Amino acid sequence: MRRYLMIVMAMGALLSVSVAGLATGDTVKVGNLEFTADGGFSPKTLPKKTLAPIALSATGKIKMADGSHPPALKEVLLETDKNGAIDVKGYPACTSGKLQSQTTPAAEKACKGTLIGTGTTNVEIEFPDSKPVPVSSKLLVFNGGFKGGTTTLFIHAYITVPVPAAIVTTVKIKKINKGRYGLLSVASIPKIAGGSGSVTSFSLKVDKKFTYKGKKKSVLTAKCPDGKLQANATAIFADGTRASQDFVKACTGKG
């Protein structure tokens, strides 16, 4: 059985690393579960030997073939290509505490100047003996800083059903030395509506350039020494489902 394709999930976990949208656009089925992902990065032509700025976009949809309520996503583990990097040094950082219980406008104000990406997400909330309720929200990706070898990102969403609540996903990114892979990202998604809410779709874009000590920088960078960028993702769901998938995305090296 082909395993569940789950890159760029984590309401943008994918976003948080320089994987550069390694989703394929295919619909992958595991039992009753169907997931469709797509994404991309620009520019597609990159230096062979030095890192260059990139922008990342990602979209995804989750549904059950029989129309039932999908399981909630708990965690995403993402190993990404050693030829990509994330660098937030010199860019202002926010904290999770400032985002908790905040509406979208309030979160933007509380963490002004730390935003690195935006998007949207749709969530389905279903309580026992009730019809599912669709809820939409804007996604905000904030820099949480770099400390002790770990980069932290916070992904904020805000829902109003059944009661107003902020959902703050924490993404921890650190370097690894595992063959092709050089970064590990771990995205921890909190319970939505007490566990009754599940993400059904998302779209996200990260394209942050800034200046630090007179030097122009990009949060996401990559190089293309051998014509491809690669990643492996593992998704863990509330019902115990655990699945992994490898990804390869072509690029053109220059220089």
Image: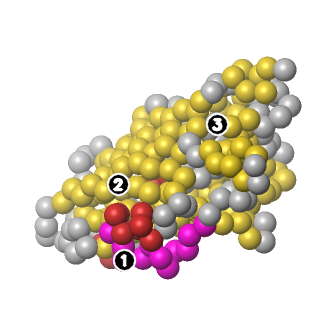
Marks 3 and 2 sit apart, C-alpha to C-alpha, by: 23 Å
Residue 221, relative to residue 172: is it above or below? above
Q: In the rendered image, is residue 130 in sight? A: yes
Residue 96, relative to residue 151: is it above or below? below
Which residue shows up at 47% across the image and 76% down it? Answer: 98
Between 82 and 132, which is closer to the camera in this rendering? 82
Q: Which residue is mark 3?
A: 54
Mark toward the start of the polypeptide (1 vs 2): 1
| Amino acid type, label 1 | Ser
Instruction: Decide whether residue 96 is among the magenta residues.
Output: yes
**Which residue of the protein is positioned furthest toward the left in this rendering?**
130
Place of residue 82 in the rendered image (x, y in percent of width and height, measured from the top left): 78, 44
Q: Which residue is mark 2?
A: 138
The circle on residue 101 is 1
| Amino acid type, label 2 | Lys
Give the side of residue 238 with respect to residue 115, left or right. Answer: left
Instruction: Decide whether residue 122 is among the magenta residues.
Output: no
The circle on residue 146 is none
**Displayed quadrant of residue 254:** top right
Crowding at mark 3 (Cα within 10 Å: few <14, some 14-19, many 20+): many
Between 249 and 129, which is closer to the camera in this rendering? 249
Q: Main secondary structure of the magenta part?
A: loop
Looking at the rendered structure, the secondary structure element under dot 3 is loop
Place of residue 19 in the rendered image (x, y in percent of width and height, measured from the top left): 64, 42
Q: In the rendered image, is residue 70 in sight? A: no
| Image quadrant containing the C terminus | top right
What segment is highlighted magenta in the picture? 93-103
